[in-house]
Image: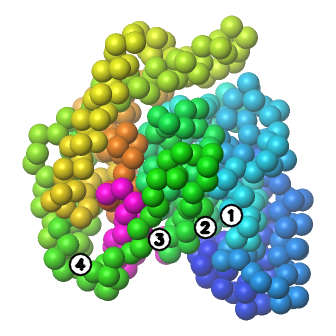
Amino acid sequence: MSEELLFLPATRAAALIRRGELSPVAYVGQVLDAIERWQPVVNAYVSVDREGALAAAAAAEAAVAAGRPLGPLHGVPVSVKDLVDVAGMRTTHGSHVHADNLAAADSIAVARLRAAGAVIVGKTTTPEFGHKGITTSPLTGITRNPWNPAHTPGGSSGGAAAAVAAGLAPLAVGTDGAGSIRGPSASAGIAGLKPTRGAIPHEAAADVFLNQSFVGPMTRTVADARLMFSVMTGPDPRDPWSLGGGPAPLPPDLQGPRLDGVRIGYVARMANPVLDPEVEARTHDMVAALRDLGAEVEEVTDAIDWAEPEGRILYQTGIAASVAALRERWGNRLDASLIAFADWGMQYGMLDRLRAERARTRLYQAVQALFGRYRFLVSPTTARTALAADFDATRPVVVAGRECGITRQSWTAYQYPFNLTGNPAMSIPSGFAADGLPTGFQIVGPWWSDYAVLRLAELLEGARPWADRRPALSA
């Protein structure tokens, strides 16, 4: 098995396939073999479609030989998080409730990836209904971080992050309802974009009008993320948010190699009381790189209410509503943390929920005011490195020796505000801590500035490259 092939950027693999220099059948076959080899270690996949993937790869190879038009991802393997439908494969949501649920059709994002020539190899693990930032579930067990299997790759797109980091397909479809693309990307040392609300249609949301969950790309390189995003973006009438605009073209002043005159606001804390000193040091390294590129970076000192209690009310009441119908039949087979989150949500009333929705508006307006002064906002992605693989999400997180509340109040506090506001937000690697685990750096832009966010990430990738680092997996 060629490790170089497994860690080849998707853009490079697609170019080789188009020139007839890389066989899609050989490429996809090696990825499938790697999945089989490392699945017992990282448990990144819940389902693998070996037969279907090899058949699609053979068709891709025949298309190259026949000189037919080829899509931008022709023959490239992709994984899909198990909250997103792939026709003919199970969408289990990490739950016994849906263990045998076969999807009748592809989701919008998956259909667009297929139309671009991508080969779907399998579905990646998620905590039950994607409810927490640790990827464990009663159905699929514990998913582990390729950099250290004693730790989690985050959640809820933990299987997607682990797969990309371990070379088990270069591209992954993730979802982000409270940081579920960005947190795992930071924990596993990859790149992940939560796009502007509506940039990639998400028709499967329980409420498409008040939706705060997003579909997005998870990759090892920014170029791969941009290509994958460009394939999945575009309007669809099933998602009303997708009809209201669209990603703006990259502005001319960001097309060059410098950031001269670009003003960036650095947010050192959000709702979290503590930031791990090593994560802070790696964040300062990234800020220094931005300044070296010519950007004007200043710390944001505004007293912003990041709406953490209100965000928690919205999140936990949503879980309570979803779980209520399942408890009588499935209660003893549901994740204990899912039940706990639902119980917490049941403590809130209608007025609490309405007040929380109004707090979301205040947060949105405060963030948009910052973009009147800054082109981008930057921050750490997580307040510390990855937690234990079996961490109990109902327990407080310890950061720098101090208990700081549950994950959303501490470890992942930098992420959820931008689910509430709808702004594009991306996590890229910022380095490693002394424990050998990756750290992440978050870039946030105004609505529809997805390509600008990707460009800033690309410039940082050039200044502080990361894709050459690979986890040393062992059983």
Tell me the quarter of the picture where residue 69 sits: bottom right
Above or below: residue 389 compared with residue 252: above
Tell me the quarter of the picture where residue 163 sits: bottom right
Under mark 2, the amino acid is Val
The magenta segment = 446-473
Mark 1 nearby-residue class (10 Å; few <14, some 14–19, many ≥20)? many
SS label for mark 1:
helix
Mark 4 nearby-residue class (10 Å; few <14, some 14–19, many ≥20)? some
- Tell me which label, 1 or 3, sits earlier in the chain: 1
Q: Which residue is painted at 89% across and 81% down in the image?
A: 62
Does the segment drawn in magenta span residue 461? yes
Under mark 4, the amino acid is Leu
Say left or right for 316 vs 100: left
Disc 3 and disc 2: Cα gap in Å?
14 Å
Say left or right for 213 vs 32: left
The answer to whether any part of residue 83 appears in the image is yes
Q: Which residue is mark 1?
A: 113
Disc 3 and disc 4: Cα gap in Å?
17 Å
Q: Quadrant of the N terminus?
A: bottom right
Does the CB distance between marks 3 and 4 fall below 8 Å?
no
Choose mark 1 or mark 3, whichever is in front.
1
- Tell me which label, 3 or 2, sits earlier in the chain: 3
Mark 2 nearby-residue class (10 Å; few <14, some 14–19, many ≥20)? many
For the residue pair 72 and 406, the one nearer the viewer reads as 72
Does the CB distance between marks 4 and 1 fall below 8 Å?
no
- In percent of width and height, residue 260 lies at 18, 80
Above or below: residue 276 compared with residue 390: below
Choose mark 3 or mark 2, whichever is in front.
2
Does the CB distance between marks 2 and 1 fall below 8 Å?
yes
Under mark 3, the amino acid is Val
